[in-house]
Image: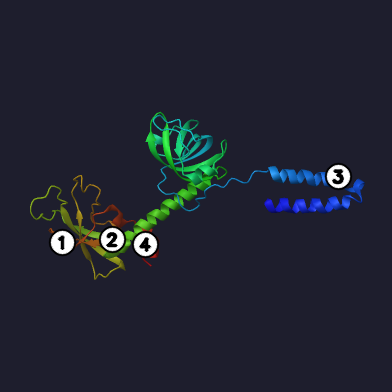
Amino acid sequence: MVVLRKLLINLFSVIYNLAMKRTSLLTSALLLLALLVQQCSSTKPPVVVENTTTTYPNSDYVIKGTVVKKNASNLSGMTSSNTTAIIKVTETIEASPNQEGFEGKEITMMLNAQQMASLQEGGDYVFFNQTTHFGNTLGAQVKAVEPGSTTTTSIKEKIRLQQQAEKNKALKERLGTADLVVTGAVISADSVPVAPIGETEHDPQYVRSRIKVKKVLKGSADGDVQFYFASSDDVHWYTAPKFYSGAPGIFLLRQNNDEGPVKGRYTLIHADDFLNNSELKLVKALLK
């Protein structure tokens, strides 16, 4: 815009000099250029919005909203400052149950200096937030902002891709720390848990099981592989996967280093260490 303004000014100067000789012929052109220069001078610069096309860190509340008032707060107990703004929620894109029901209502958001500078009162934006305050209304820490013109479908797809990327990252880390990764199916599981060594408040009640290996993806194994899982429903172990004969899948096994009856043996005690065979292509890619 600045370049265009300078160009028009230069053209204005040239035409003006010519007009000294042919005034009657160029008057209209001079008037038109003058209007264009004035328009360029008064045009506001475009609003720069923080762009987050690839990551939405720690966002648990995603909405579309209109900026009602900057440097303001409508949340009881939160003082207005240059880092707070009142936002009217126009659409909820992602939220937990205690964050729903605020469409059409005003909430308070906390922003950093760059985010605040990018907002205009009356403007519509997409806000990626982490809810931090609950009172007469919500208070949320803004993690990222996008233009309000961004479609809901596009936002949901970006969120899905980000969540998948985070899931893949976590799985890659688990694959990296596993001692043995195999595909196959459980062919047997003992009916009686291994006896603990000494007294323990949260005995996992380890059960010995065997996998008929179809393919080794990491580590080495000859024939069937023996491992132990926690059969206890104790609060410490109730989320650990329980195995029965016939269960197919991808097994991430780890050697147990704790003092006890299964020290030095393979165990599978975390739900994320047992995967459906449909994840095989992804697992192979992450292991490369």
Q: Residue furthest left?
A: 198
In the depicted structure, whether residue 1 falls above or below residue 254: above
Q: Residues within 10 Å of mark 1 (few under 14, many from 20)?
A: few
Q: Amino acid at mark 2?
A: Leu
Classify mark 1: helix, strand or loop.
loop
Separation (CA) of disc 4 from disc 1 = 27 Å
Classify mark 2: helix, strand or loop.
strand
Q: Which mark is residue 28?
A: 3
In the depicted structure, whether residue 233 falls above or below residue 259: above
Q: In the image, what residue occupies the spot 36% across and 65% down?
A: 287
Separation (CA) of disc 2 from disc 4 = 11 Å
Instruction: Give the labeled residue for mark 4.
Output: 283
Are discs 3 and 2 less than 8 Å apart at CB?
A: no
Q: Earlier in the sequence, mark 3 or mark 2?
A: 3
Q: Residues within 10 Å of mark 2 (few under 14, many from 20)?
A: many
Of discs 3 and 4, which sits in the foreground?
3
Separation (CA) of disc 3 from disc 1 = 94 Å
